[in-house]
Amino acid sequence: MKKTLLLLISALIYNVAALAAAPDNADSAYSQSRYQDAIRLYEAQAQAEGTSSDLYYNLGCAHYKMQDVPRAILYFERALVLDPGNDDARDNLTFIREKAKIAPSTSGSFFSDLLQQSVSRVSSNAWAIMAAVIFVLLLLAIAAYIFMGSILLRKVGFFSAGLLLVAFIATLACAFYQRAATVGHSQAIVMPQSATLSTAPHAPSEKEVAFRLKGGMKVNIVDSVKTAKPAETWYKVESKRNQQAWILATDIEKI
């Protein structure tokens, strides 16, 4: 009996010690306001288990708590790339940009910006599924036009086929657009609090300063150059209103 009790006590002590030695939990670190530890643990989780929209969202929240606005924006953007339906990430992104007075990148056209925002709210897979469903309906409408004996039904099939064809092409284009945005890595976030852009791919003189961008701004990468002396990579980027200039690669992070 004493031996059994001793074994039970030893097992209890072992379990308590193992629990104390267990790796810290990122969520608990965040809830305890240990944001730097939470970031480290979330990043370790990403390396071990792979990335996800929720994980990027958590990293964005932790970086915001650390008052690192550009990196918080970066991770919320990455969360939306993986899951355009992540409304929490979208709301936080809008809140941070408004609070930091960082205007979202635009193409300068209201309708094109509205179209881009609408398309980006749905994943490429969801657009592809919609395109497949519309294609099936298109085939049914064509079959109705060919095989139906009623003139009215044939007219309905004909006009329905025309509308469905337009819808199929549009949804397929949206699927390809969203897929390219997901895997293309053509967008990036400016990371310093203020970045100086050059008219040429090298450190600018006073006359070569193109403009400056605030940290957290989104830019589109359109070209890149590697210089020999010094050994650097420069990206030609496009900001809102189609302004183009060169920025040092270390000053941006690809989404």
Image (spheres, rainbow, N blue to C red):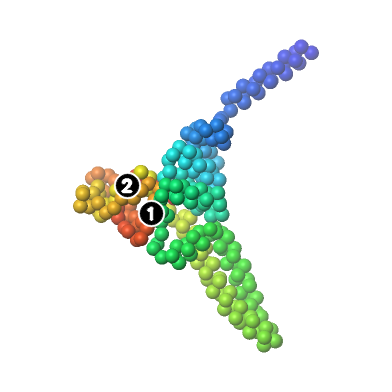
Q: Which residue is mark 1?
A: 219
Q: Residues within 10 Å of mark 1 (few under 14, many from 20)?
A: many
Return the mark for residue 195. 2
Mark 2 residue element: strand
Q: With 173 as the anchor, is 16 left or right in this view?
A: right
Q: Residues within 10 Å of mark 2 (few under 14, many from 20)?
A: some
Q: Is residue 229 visible?
A: yes
Question: Which mark is first along the chain, 1 or 2?
Answer: 2
Looking at the image, do the residues carrying marks 2 and 1 touch, with CB atoms under 8 Å apart? no
Using the image, tell me which numbered label, if any, was put on residue 254: none
Nearer the observer, 130 or 68: 68
Number of residue marks: 2
Q: Is residue 21 above or below residue 225?
A: above
Question: At 36% across and 56% down in the image, what residue appears?
Answer: 239
Residue at coordinates 33% horizontally, 45% vertically from top-left? 194
Left-right relation of 37 to 215 = right
Q: CA distance from mark 2 to mark 1?
A: 12 Å
Q: Residue at x 62, y 67 (%)?
A: 133
Query: Which amino acid is tagged 1?
Result: Val
Quarter containing the N terminus: top right
Q: What's under tag 2, amino acid-wise?
A: Ala
